[in-house]
Amino acid sequence: RSDGGEIATVEPSKGKPPVTEHSVVNLDHGDPTLYVEFWRGTGDRATIVIPGWQTMSYFSDLVGFCWFVEPTFEREVRRLHRLVGNAVVDGYHLLVGTGSTQLFQAALYALSPAQDGSPMSVVSPAPYYSSYPSVTNFLNSALYRWDGDANFFGGDTCIELVCSPNNPDGAIRKPVIKSESRKTIHDFAYYWPQYTPITEAGDHDIMLFTVSKCTGHAGTRLGWALVKDVEVAQKMVKFMELNTIGVSKDSQLRAAKIIKVVCDGYELSPPSEANRLFHFGQRKMKERWSRLRATVAASDIFSLPNEISGYCNFVKENVTSNPPFAWLRCHKDGVEDFEGFLREHKILTRGGPKFGVDEKVVRVSMLDTDEAFNMFMNRVASLK
Ligand code: PMP
């Protein structure tokens, strides 16, 4: 080592408490701890060390399109999309954000207000991701406002949020509003091969992605946007400058290394599952889904959306989708509030009303640890 010093290791926090026989299983959030096993298996290949004197400047790239994007991060993200084939990158501007949550807000800012100066309506078909209404409205902005279920939207000028595969129900979605003055934000957090067949390379105006659900590094808080129109992209950059003066370089370098290891695993290493993140994820998700489907089929009080399948251009075979969440419905007489019913049985989930629908359905994370998933399966199987 050139500096001759010790690598100082700091003790990280441990995240959520472990699940024990008597504890509550928390599957309310989509905390992607399923992937820890894969990354443990990569040993030091995905480790980075940042000396104390590095990443100190605010600036990353003063000649590129966006001054706070780390060039190695941009390079690895473009490489990843070319490998997977889930989005067109040529001709697109790439922006980075503190999670795709920040980029979502940057996109709302860039597309608003409506042409006549009134607040832009923001809509998505129910069931929609529960953060959309709250993140849209929490600052009570005069630029845009949440206008609910896109299926019941009466106007034409709006931003439609297209989440595909959809959080919470896993549906594959296209925009439902047909008007010419409808703008879209495609939320592709889950458009990765472990969750769904990759059927086409997305080429929409604004596409949002996140390492949280792609590699499982939710704590790194890194997302990216592919944006077609240069003026929209510039306004998004402006939002990021005003909001946080750019995005952590340390996180970008870490994400770049993680994504590099994913790409190398396919392009440079022997084809084993220990090197292939999407194959690992697909196997784990498939195992969990077949166990859950078997349990639900054996019960007469629960149901799930039908399985969907298709030809995946990435794995080059027909695959069934393995959504990141189970959208579980309860048909038991007398159970009105299904989230409350499961809470009494020490299972935390998120109820339908937060997604704009009824109380007899809940969203359950399929991305947690084996311990949490197994405990959930045991408890659900015992409910009559
Ligand atoms: N979009 C969807 C559909 C999500 O489910 C999530 C995370 N739950 C996000 C965006 C935000 O992800 P992050 O801010 O961690 O990048």
Image: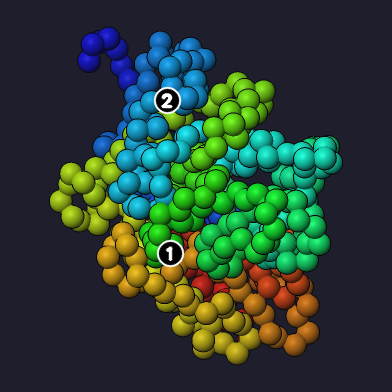
Amino acid at dot 2? Glu
**In percent of the image, x 61 and y 74: which residue is there?**
328
Q: Position of residue 235 (x, y in %)?
A: 63, 30
**In percent of the image, x 60 and y 49: which residue is there?**
185
On screen, residue 309 above or below 312: below
Identify the residue under disc 1: 196
Q: CA distance from mark 1 to mark 2?
A: 29 Å
On screen, residue 194 above or below 137: below
The image's colour scheme reads rainbow
Q: Position of residue 27 (x, y in %)?
A: 58, 60
**Residue 286 can be seen, yes or no:** yes
**Residue 189 can be seen, yes or no:** no
**In percent of the image, x 49 and y 20: which residue is there?**
67
Circle 1 residues within 10 Å: few <14, some 14–19, many ≥20? many
User: In the image, 364: left or right of 373?
Assistant: right
CB-based contact (under 8 Å), mark 1 and mark 2: no
Where disc 1 sits, the SS reads loop
Circle 2 residues within 10 Å: few <14, some 14–19, many ≥20? many
User: In the image, 16: left or right of 1?
Assistant: right
On the image, which quarter does residue 75 sit in? top left
On the image, which quarter does residue 34 sit in? bottom left
Residue closest to the eye, 255 or 128: 128
On screen, residue 291 above or below 80: below
Q: Position of residue 377 (x, y in %)?
A: 51, 73
Residue closest to the eye, 297 or 183: 183
Identify the residue under disc 2: 70
Residue closest to the eye, 154 or 11: 154
The N terminus, quarter of image: top left
